[in-house]
Every structure is written in C-alpha cells, then in structure tokens.
Image (cartoon, grey):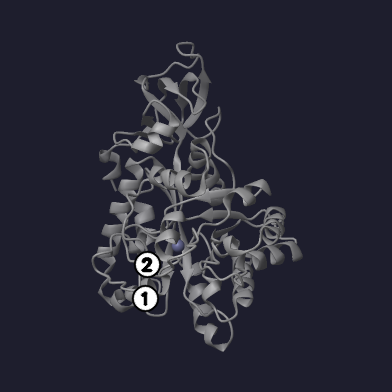
Amino acid sequence: MTTSILFADAQLVDGSIVDIATENGLIAWIGTPSQSPVVCLKTINLDGYVLSTSFVEPHAHLDKAFLADRISNPAGDLMGAIRGLEAVRETITHEDLVERATRAVHLMSKNGVTSIRTHADTTISGGLSSIHALLEVKKNCAQFMDIQVAMLLEWPVTGLAGKEHQALARDAISVGIDVVGGCPHLDPDPRGAVEFLVNLAVESGLPLDLHADENMRPASSDLEHLADIVLRDNLSHKMNASHCVALSTRSETDIDRIAAKVSAAGITVTALPQTNLFLQERGVSTNQARAITPIHRLQQAGVIVAAGADNLQDPFNLVGRADPLEIASLLMISTHVTADMAVQMISSDAHQAVHGIKSALTVGQPANFVALPATNLRESIAMGPPDRIVVYGGVVIDNQIRNRK
Ligand SMILES: [Zn+2]
C-alpha cells in the first residue's frame, strides 16, 4: 500500500539539500526543507544520505547467476564460458534457476536497483526453460522490482540451419517475453542475423536488445548494420545494442561515422565493462586493449550510453556484487568518466535504454530512488556503502516486502 512520505533533508547529486514528498507512488513535491505543502503520514530523515534516482540494471543474465563454482572455463574467454555452460545445462533445474535468480534480484534490490532487464538463454538444448523460470521470478518480485525478460536466442538464426532457432524465437514470443534479442556476431551471417532479429522485434511489437560486436575484431559490424537497417527502413522502434566492444578497435574516423548513424537511428548502447574486461583480450601481454565500447565518442555524437554488470559470479564473470556502484567505480577507473556521469549511466541513462525514457527526481515522476549513506556521490561510489534506503513506487523496500509473494 502506498502512503504519503516526507523524505527530509536529502542531499541531491548537485549538493543541494531538499525535502521530497511522495504521494500515490509519485514524487509530489520537492523543495526547501520544512516547507512541504503536502500533508505526509510519515517522515524519514535522510540527513547524511545522497539521493539518486534508483539504479537500473540494463543487462543481466539472472539464469546464470552464481554458477561460477559449478562450471569450469579454463580458457577464460567467451566461447569457453558458453561451452562450459552448455556442458552442464541439463543439471540446471527450474527450482535451482528460480532460487539463484531470486537471490540475485534481492541483492540488486538492496543495492538500490528497482528495474532489471535480464536476458534468458533460448537454446535448442534448454528450450524455453530459462524464460519460464525468469517469468516466474518477474511475477514473484513484482512488488519491488520491475523485470523485463529478453530472449537470448542461440545461433545460427540465418540460412537453413537457422530455421529451428527461428521457430524457437516465435515460441519464446508466444509465452510472453518482453524483449527480442540474440547475438549476431556469432552467426555465420551477422548482417542477416541482425536483419532477422530486427524484423522479429518489429513484427512482434517488442523492443530489441542485441549482444552486438562482443569481440575485438575490427571487421565486426553488428552495431553499424543495426543503425543502417533502422535508417534505411525509417524505423522508430526501441532498440539497444549491448557490448559493442569491437567498435573500440576502429579508427577515430570510423567510430565517429558509426556513432553519428547510431545517434540518428536513436539506438541506445549498453557498456558492460566488467564482463568484457574479464572475457576479452585473454593471452594478450602487450598493448592490451581495454575492451570497452568508446563511451565518450558515442556520447559526443548524442548516443545514450547505459552501463550494467552483465554476468554475476558465473563462468562469464567470476566476480561481481550485484551492485551498480561497483560498475560506476570501474567506469571511473577504466573509462575516465566523472562520478556524476558514472551514476547517470547506471540510473537515468540505463532507464532510457530499458524503458525508452530517462528517469529523474522531479515532480510527477515515479518515486523510485535510492538514498546512499555518504557525504557525496564520489564517496558513495568509492565506498559502496551498505544500509541504503531503497524506494520503489513510493514504498520503502525491506526484506518483508522482498520475501512476500
Ligand atoms: Zn549479456
């Protein structure tokens, strides 16, 4: 049940101190402390906290969370992780998957996340098992987390060999997925795969989120193919490209040319530095590249760039704490963005990648925010403090709510 609450003496990202009144799940008023015109039933003092619009995890794999100790990946690279997972897929039960995914969702919630887009393996060997389990988790957690389930379609999706996967994709849509997705860079015909997945998204009326250019080959061009198709067909459809690390291997001229197209096409990009740094550039000992999409140049061209964690303690990324502030810290270190920009990428820009609009702490917006016990944003990123206050739809989320079904 939603009640009106006054969140008093909160420090905003810009350092100003305000009171925020919430009512019916929305931000009803923001202003000078102690002058709220809204009669609130309850006051929560946020003195000593920094307030941000809540975090959004734009790219998770909840079905794989916490499998690190059950799957070996001696090569340590992307294909090693995929093969390792495939070798144990039949040992993953529905209950097992729901339990691990739920554990990950609870952790993210405690850390200030109120919205997750999770990809769900959609393979011939596993069928729709990940999708069914994650749709169940989505339902169970709906009171405190807005979850989108994206199909992660196995390859190939082109040619004769792709027919079975194409049929599987249509089955996935029929059981209620929220987002179409796949990995064209692994298909024998990457451009054809992008074309198929775009058509599927448009036909089904669902957003598209591709695992694009998740490699360090300069010839990999999923992102450019996607932008070309959108511009050619004049599509206005929610589309996001995740990873896009191959773009970092191109010349500055190429990057700017592609970034301009991506911007014109309205495609958002999601950077996933933790998993990309873990899986890419294995065995390279000199001039090792950072394997992160060129965030600054994309932003300069007007592209919205979100940031997420991707994998959580599985063979694709053995570490991770389900905390977007960990990703913000990594962004500051590895890509030299400011603290303000790092938090924008894990909150409002991630919201745009997932929901098509930015989130903001303004009157009329959903009351979704996180209060971080810290003196400022930089310190919150550095310390990753526990005991955050998380508000979703105007409700302060606690374990009682998280454990309710
Ligand atoms: Zn992924």
| Circle 2: element type | helix
* Marks 2 and 1 in Cβ contact (< 8 Å): yes
Residue, x 23% and y 65% (percent of image)?
Answer: 69
Query: Where's residue 244, x and y in %?
Result: 56, 61
Image-based side of 144 in relation to 210, left or right: left
Residue, x 60% and y 61% (percent of image)?
Answer: 205
**Depth check: 132 or 384 in front?**
384
Q: Is residue 321 visible?
A: yes
| The image quarter in which residue 312 lies | bottom left
Q: Name the residue under label 1.
A: 126
* Tag of residue 130: 2
Residue, x 72% and y 54% (percent of image)?
Answer: 264
Query: Where's residue 277, x and y in %?
Result: 43, 59
Looking at the picture, does residue 91 appear above or below residue 208? below
| Circle 1: element type | loop
**Depth check: 151 or 327 in front?**
327
Query: Where's residue 181, x and y in %?
Result: 52, 66
Looking at the picture, does residue 320 appear above or below residue 16? below
Looking at the picture, does residue 185 appear above or below residue 326? below
